Amino acid sequence: MDFKQQTYQLIDDLKLTCTSSGLGNDGNEYKIITQVFLYKFLNDKFGHEVKEISPRLENAESWETEYEQMSEDEILDLWDALSPDTPRLKPQHLISYLFNNSQRGDFDLIFDQTMLDIAELNINIFNTHTVEETKIPIFEKLTDFVTDSAKRSEFARALVNKLAKFSFESVFNEKYDFFSDIFEYLIKDYNNAGGGKYAEYYTPKSIARVMARLLVGDNPDLHSVQCYDPSAGTGTLLMALAHQIGEDRCTIYSQDISQRSNKMLKLNLILNNLVASLDNAVQGDTLVSPYHKENDNVTLKKFDFIVSNPPFKLDFPDTHSEVASQTARFWAGVPNLPSAINPQKPKMAIYTCFLQHVINSLKDGKGKGAIVVPTGFITAKSGIEKRILQRIVDEKMVSGVVSMPSNVFATTGTNVSVLFFDKGKTDDEVVLIDASKLGEDYKEGTNQKCRLLDFEIDQIVNTFRNKQKVDDFSVVVSYDEIKEKGYSLSAGQYFDIKIDYVDITEDEFNERMSNYQETLAAQFAESHRLENEIMKQLKSLNFNTDKEI
C-alpha cells in the first residue's frame, strides 16, 4: 500500500472512531477529523524539524524520549532555531506522551487540555481571525462532543491509538499535487450542499487548475505576489493559484463567512506550506464587511490575482439594506429581496455582488482574475448582469470565457462558466471557449458527475493562450464584435453556420423524396387515427350523478 492510500486509511479509521462513538454524520464530526489530522501532521512536522537541527535528537534511539530529557533552556534554544511555520510543542504535547498516558481515567481531560495548550502556545502564528479581530485558535476541545461523559476517555484513547501508528515524516518534501488529493479525500464528506445557509461548494481541482494556469502561466517569474479569494471556501482555488505561482513567492488573502470553511482553509494552508498567510485568512461576510483594505482602512485592497467560486443564489434579508447602501462599491446594483423567503430555494443572484467586488479589488493596469459564474450570465439581456457585462466589455477588461461541461460541479446542476479578467490587457481580442462537450461522465453514489481529463485541460489552456479558433470549440472576437452581438460572451453565438452539401444523382434524390413522403403519409394517418380514437373516448364519457352516502 502506497503512502497516499495509507493516509486515506488513517482518515477512514478516524471517521470510523467517530461513528463508533455516535458522532458519524454529526455536525461536529468535521471539526474532530480535521483537527486530529492536523495535530498529527504538526506533531510529525515538529519532530522532523527538530531532528534536522539537533544531532542529539537525530541520533537518539527515540527522539521523543530524548526531548523529554532536555532542560527548559535547551528546549527554548531549540525553538529559536525553528522556522516560523513550525509549531512549538512541549514534551507533554507530543502524541507519544499522550499514548503513554492514554490509560489514565481522566485521559479525555488530558487530551483536550493538550489541544488547548498547543493552540495557546502557537496563537500568534497558527490562527485565523474574524472581521472583529477575534482570534480563532488552531485547536479546541473535542471530547465534549461525545454526549456520554463516561465514554469520552475511551474516544480520546481511540483517536490517539490511530495517530500513534502512522507517520507523515517521509512526505514533508511532497508538494501541492500530493496534499491536494489528501485534502480532497479528507473533506469529501463535509463539503456539500447540506451545510446550511452558507453551504460550501467544493471547486473541482480540474477547474482550479484551468483557472490557475490561465491566470499565471506555466513558467512565471513572479515575486511578492498577492492573491485573494473573497469567497474562499476551503481554499481549493487559492491553493492551485499559489502552487502555480510558487508557494514561497506569494501571499494569500481570503475571506469567507463560514466557520466550517475557515477551519478547513486553515488546514489547507498549513498542508501547503502557507503558514505565513494564516493571519490573512479571515472569517466574516465579505459583502457586508470586506476585511482586506489599504492603509487608510477605507479603500479596498487591490490584488495581483483574484479567484472566486461564490454562491450563485442566496437570500440575505438581514443585511440587504446594508449591502445595498454601498452604491459606489456595487455600481451595477444589488439583487432585490424576493417577496417571500424560502431557505431551500433562494432567488437572489448574489454572485453578481461578488463579481463587482472582484472587479473593484483588482490592481489597476495589471490585476488578473477568474470567477465562476452561471453560464446564463454570459448572455444576460437585462438587469444587473447586463450592466456588469457592458462594463467589463466597454472597459476592455474581460480576456475570455470558458464554458464548462454540465455536472462538473457535483453539488449544483447549474451549468457554469469561468470568466477571466485582465486589467493590463493591451490587445482587442477576447477568447471564448465552449468546453461543454468535454469531460468524462461518471457516478458517485447517486450523483451523476463529469470530470475534465488531463489532456482536455491542456486543450483548453493551450487554445486559450494561443488564441486559436477551433471549429465548434473556440472563437477569438473583438470587443466591437461582442457589442454587435448584444454583449454576449457565449462562444456558440459566434460559431460559423455550416451547411454540408452531398453529391447525389437525380434518381437518388427522387427515391429519398419518395421515402420521406411515404413516411410522413404513414405518420399523418396514424395521427388522424389517434385523434379519432381520443374523440370517440371523450364522447363516451358521462357525468356520474350517483353520490356516496
Image (cartoon, rainbow, N blue to C red):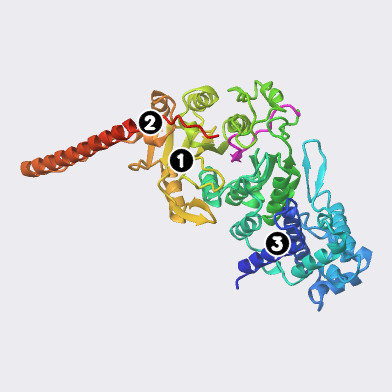
Q: Looking at the figure, which quarter contains the C terminus?
A: top right
Which quadrant of the structure image shows residue 231? Answer: top right
Span colored in magenta? 297-313
Residue 276 magenta-highlighted = no
* Residue type, label 1: Ser
The percent position of residue 229, horizontal first and vertical second, equals: 64, 40
Relative to residue 402, is residue 331 drawn left or right? right
* Residue type, label 2: Asn
The percent position of residue 105, horizontal first and vertical second, equals: 91, 68
Crowding around mark 3 (Cα neighbors within 10 Å: few <14, some 14 to 19, many 20+) is many
Q: Is any atom of residue 369 visible in this view?
A: yes
Q: Secondary structure at mark 2?
A: loop
Which quadrant of the structure image shows residue 336? Answer: top right
In the current view of this chain or complex, which residue is farthest to the bottom? 61
Q: Secondary structure at mark 3?
A: helix
Query: Which residue is labeled 3 in the image?
Result: 15
The percent position of residue 104, horizontal first and vertical second, equals: 90, 69
* Residue type, label 3: Lys
Mark 2 and mark 3 in contact (Cβ < 8 Å)? no
